[in-house]
Amino acid sequence: MRIYDKFYINGQWVEPIGKGTSEVINPANGEISATVPYGNAEDVNAAVSAARNAFDSWSRTSAAERADFLRKIAIEGERRNADLTQTIIDELGMPIKNAAEFQVDSLAIICESFADKARQMEEQEEVGNSIIIKEPIGVCAMINPWNYPIWQLIGKVAPAIAAGCTMVVKAASQTPSHLFIFAEICDAVGLPAGVFNMVHGSGREIGGALSSHPDVDLVSFTGSTSAGVQVSNKAAPSVKRVCLELGGKSPFIITEEADLDAAINFGVDHVMVNTGQTCDALTRMIIHESRYEEAVELAKSKAENLVVGDPTDPGVFVGPMSSAGQKQSVLDYIDQAIADGARLVTGGTDMPAGLTSGNYVSPTIFADVTNDMTIAQEEVFGPVLVMIRYSDIDQAIEIANDTPYGLAAGVWAGDKDKATAIARRIRAGQCAINGGAPNHEAPFGGYKESGNGREFGVEGLHEYCELKAMQY
Ligand code: NAP
């Protein structure tokens, strides 16, 4: 068991002011995997003050120096790879293969990506009699969810370092251990004191104090839409920038002439990876009526062949839900869908075969779903796919756009051009075309109630910049 009892503030491990502690529970077996300090708003004040004091000198370092620190973090992160992977398994229950590939390996990749972009901070543009430059926005507060902890952490920290910002980070209460290791990494590479600071505690208290703090210039928040609204409200009086990366209920349109086998394989995997706890999961599959029953059979067979179980087993694809509460919430959605008349094709509320304990939920598929049902409108955040019929493409697009969200989408059509034409009509920030892979050099973010920010790529750097025009 890991025991942490200090926060990393101003380049030192310091005694928290708030005296609480919190246990981190392994969702696969219910054991305590770590204990961490649970601080209060005074800890936030100390961390913000350190970040504020460090900003002036850090913001004047050269882009090359900051890129160098990012590369050192990448190397040190790789040295701590096994430790980080085990932590993600222990606190989140993500199966080992995905924990390594989607999370821990991303640390070095994203650091390298923003190390390359740091020099853009020193470029200037001339427009008429103006010189236009980018400057770091200042002190950044970063509030993260539990579902892809390292990916989300590095997607904020790396561009902030590249831009010359200083920061205070809070992880989700459920998954804090990786953040303590990341602080050890920043310390090991000699990142100047006050550039990176971390505190831990409840979203309401610590997150609220960060959001409203007058010395914070930007809040980058990833989480639920409801908490994102609260962050915005708290931030409004100080007119700070708020970047929101929120929830989704993403559609996947499969046309009549699509390669159905490939499309269903892609779609089921997309929903079930990380046990459905993925913000951009394509949870609403919208299929032409002429191929609907064929698609249902293919999806059933694919879901029933997924290996569910112990996340430390390299052969497992679907691990436990991240917490008992999350499991219960998913089971409630399944019950509600059945009550609303959706057809249960596979899965349901029973434990997956062969498992008797842990927060497991069977990969579940519903057919005969209409888009007005709760299961089609609300983010379930579990291994649950719904299949909806359409008769013509205008109707499919109308269904795709008919939610408050707009984070992601997918289209599988006869060819790339046909799929792209459909994708252009969907109100979402991302679209997978005929199974296209994610690209960390492209901007990621939502339309509508899925948020207003963009992470990754050049746009991810721009979130941490102010623009200045100097006229001569
Ligand atoms: P959450 O409950 O909104 O929590 C997210 C973070 O915000 C946690 O650190 C939480 O702290 C904190 N928080 C909670 N209430 C707050 C408040 N009033 N003020 C400030 N901070 C507050 O979300 P979650 O359950 O961790 O994560 C799942 C959600 O994140 C899903 O909706 C998912 O779609 C979304 N998500 C979006 C993206 C994206 O890029 N768009 C990526 C991943 C996840 P505590 O843990 O201490 O409560």
Image (spheres, rainbow, N blue to C red):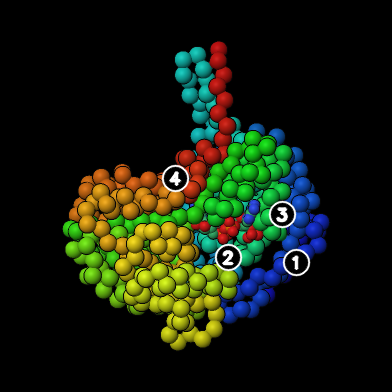
User: What residue would you read off at disc 3?
Assistant: 205
Q: Is residue 35 left or right of residue 343?
A: right
Q: How far apart are labels 1 and 4 at the CA level?
A: 37 Å
Mark carried by residue 312:
none
Ligand 1 - quadrant of the structure image: bottom right
Front residue (pair 170, 361): 361
Q: How far apart are labels 3 and 2 at the CA level?
A: 27 Å
Quarter of the image with the N terminus in it: bottom right
Q: Is residue 117 left or right of residue 428?
A: right
User: What residue would you read off at disc 1?
Assistant: 21
Of badges 4 and 2, the one in the foreground is 4
User: What residue would you read off at disc 2?
Assistant: 84
440 in relation to 272, above or below: above
Q: Earlier in the sequence, mark 1 or mark 4?
A: 1
468 in relation to 221, above or below: above
Report the amino acid beneath label 2.
Leu
Q: Residue at x 58, y 49 (%)?
A: 228
Report the amino acid beneath label 4.
Tyr
Q: Is residue 441 in view from this perspective? A: no
Q: Earlier in the sequence, mark 4 or mark 3?
A: 3
Mark carried by residue 447:
4
Q: Quadrant of residue 301?
A: bottom left
Of badges 3 and 2, the one in the foreground is 3
